[in-house]
Image (cartoon, helix red, strand yellow):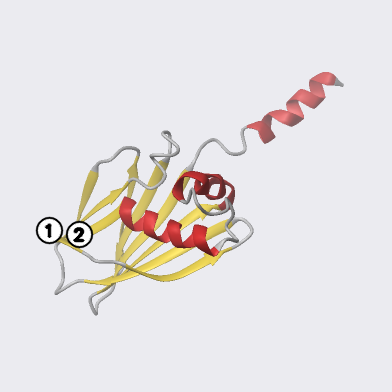
Amino acid sequence: MAALASVTLVPQAHAHRGHDAMSVVTLLPDGKVTVSHRFEAHDLEPALAEIAPNAQTSLDDPDAIAELKTYLLAHFSVSADGIAVPLTVASVEVGVRDVRVDYAGTVQGRPKAVAVKSTILRDIYPRQVNQVSVRRGQYVQTLRFSGDEVKTVALP
């Protein structure tokens, strides 16, 4: 019976192997740029203790969410053809399992390349891996960040 119990517990113990974040950068034909960040709530909420030390460590606290918005802007950047894309908060959705924060910006013309830097939560969870997909039309390229590197995507 003990052997059966240990077999049953193994998959549960490895269900969540590490911290990660998913971001999508979308370039639209009219020059608009959207950035959507998605996090697991159980990864993000404990991080609020460092992101928003003067707020409650809760995704229900408006002060913590305000600090989170600022933190994300400081730890994620996009540039198009070498020009930084200023981003502003478009929306925040806090669900039971997920947190989604969307930003909006604009670019001039049709950029040939986009550079992305994502250090989101790397200062809190050193093993954090961030995945960023860059999209324009049907073209999609996915990048993985595990440090403070900048990655460039050549656009068709």
Residue 82: give its label.
1
Q: Residue 153: percent from the left, percent from the top?
A: 21, 54
Which of 122 and 50 lies nearest the eye of the viewer? 50
> On the image, numbered disc 2 is attached to which residue?
79
Tag 2, which secondary structure? strand
Residue plotted at (43% across, 53% down)? 22
Residue plotted at (66% across, 32% down)? 13
**Identity, as a three-letter code, of the amino acid under mark 1:** Gly
Quarter holding the C terminus is bottom left
Tag 1, which secondary structure? loop
Residue plotted at (49% across, 48% down)? 53
Question: Is there CB contact under 8 Å for labels 1 and 2?
Answer: yes
Residue plotted at (48% across, 67% down)? 92
**Identity, as a three-letter code, of the amino acid under mark 2:** Ser
Q: Residue 72: percent from the left, percent from the top?
A: 38, 55
Give the image quarter of residue 123. Answer: top left
The answer to whether 144 is drawn above or below residue 80 in the figure is: above
Q: CA distance from mark 1 to mark 2?
A: 6 Å
Q: Residue furthest bottom?
A: 30
User: Is residue 108 rendered to the left or right of residue 69?
Assistant: left
